[in-house]
Structure formats: C-alpha cells, structure tokens
Amino acid sequence: MKKVENKEQNAVIMPSLDKTDLAILKLLQENARITVKEISEKVHLSTTPVHERIKRMEQTGVIKQYATLVDYAKVKKGLMVICYVSLKEHSKNAGLKFIKSINALHEVIECYNISGEFDFMLKVVEENMDSYYDFHVNRLSLIENMGNIQSVFVMGVIKQTHQLVW
C-alpha cells in the first residue's frame, strides 16, 4: 500500500538544530516537567533564549507534544496487543477512512502505516482477553474495508521510551 498522507507530517520543516537545541530536547525528553530555569542552568544560557528555542521547536513541530508514560497494568490496561492489519482496497480515500476509524478507537494507542504483508500495525491496550475479544469482534473487525487482522499478544515490555539520542 502506498503511504497515506497525514496533514501533521506536512508541517513546516525546521532549520537544522544546533548543539544547544539538541541539549534542550534531551533534557525535555528526560523530564517534560523540567523548568526553563533548570534547562537554562544546564545549557548555560539565560531563560529568554531557552524559552524562545523551545517555542520555535514547538511551532515548527519538532516538539509535537508533552507526554506521560503510564504503567498500563496499574490503570487496568494490562493486556497489550500488536495488531497487523491489511485492507481490502488500497485507494487513498479508503486509507483515509480507515485512519479516521482507527483514530476514533481509544483502545488503539499507536498506529503505523507499514510495508510488507500488512498495511498497518496497531498497538492496542485492553484490560484483559475478554475485553480484547469484544474490541476485536465488535469494533475493529467491523471497520469498513477491513481485510485481514493478525493479533500478537505482548508477554512483557522490555524497553519503553520516547527518547531519541544524538
């Protein structure tokens, strides 16, 4: 399937990042709640230029959002499933309809357009096998143009991070 266009991917391209920008990003990835003052001390700049750099990276889409990693089991979402999905039809319109449907499913926490045998890879969290079965049968499989779904159950999380390293 051809790559499905996403408006967020067409954001303004930021000029290359310098050492200070990368240091700021590293600190924010380690702790999104770090203050501008704390960042300023660590990168040896005053607060105003640090604040301006962060705002510029937010406005240009380098920083997409600030997030909190959650222990799924502690919020009763202990079952993680990777779903590989293929569509019956591969037109742009069909792909966009599928994406709209997936975005409406709160159980799907990540969705990737992939190459190979399948068109999409979904990361789904549910409370248990019964709730996943209900989701699969009564919601996911009923999406228009759904072809094949292959579910792989995650037995343990070895590494979970959103930090990029330079």
Image (tube, rainbow, N blue to C red):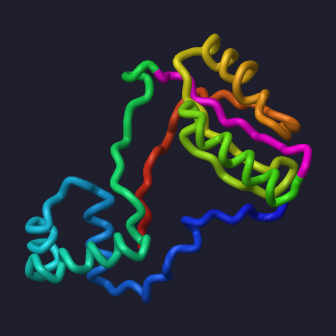
* Residue at the image position 28 percent from the left and 62 percent from the top: 28
* Residue at the image position 54 percent from the left and 33 percent from the top: 106
Q: Is residue 154 above or below residue 22?
A: above
Q: Residue furthest top?
A: 130
Q: Determine the image quadrant of residue 86.
A: top right
Q: Is residue 123 above or below residue 26?
A: above
Task: List x then y, in percent, for residue 76.
Answer: 44, 19
Task: Label the magenta part by its dominant secondary structure.
Answer: strand
**In the foreground, 99 or 83:** 99
For the C terminus, the image quarter is bottom left
* Residue at the image position 37 percent from the left and 42 percent from the top: 69
Q: Does residue 125 appear left or right of residue 69 in this picture?
A: right
* Residue at the image position 14 percent from the left and 67 percent from the top: 36
Residue range highlighted in magenta: 77-89
Q: Does residue 31 appear left or right of residue 12 in this picture?
A: left
Task: List x then y, in percent, for residue 16.
Answer: 43, 87
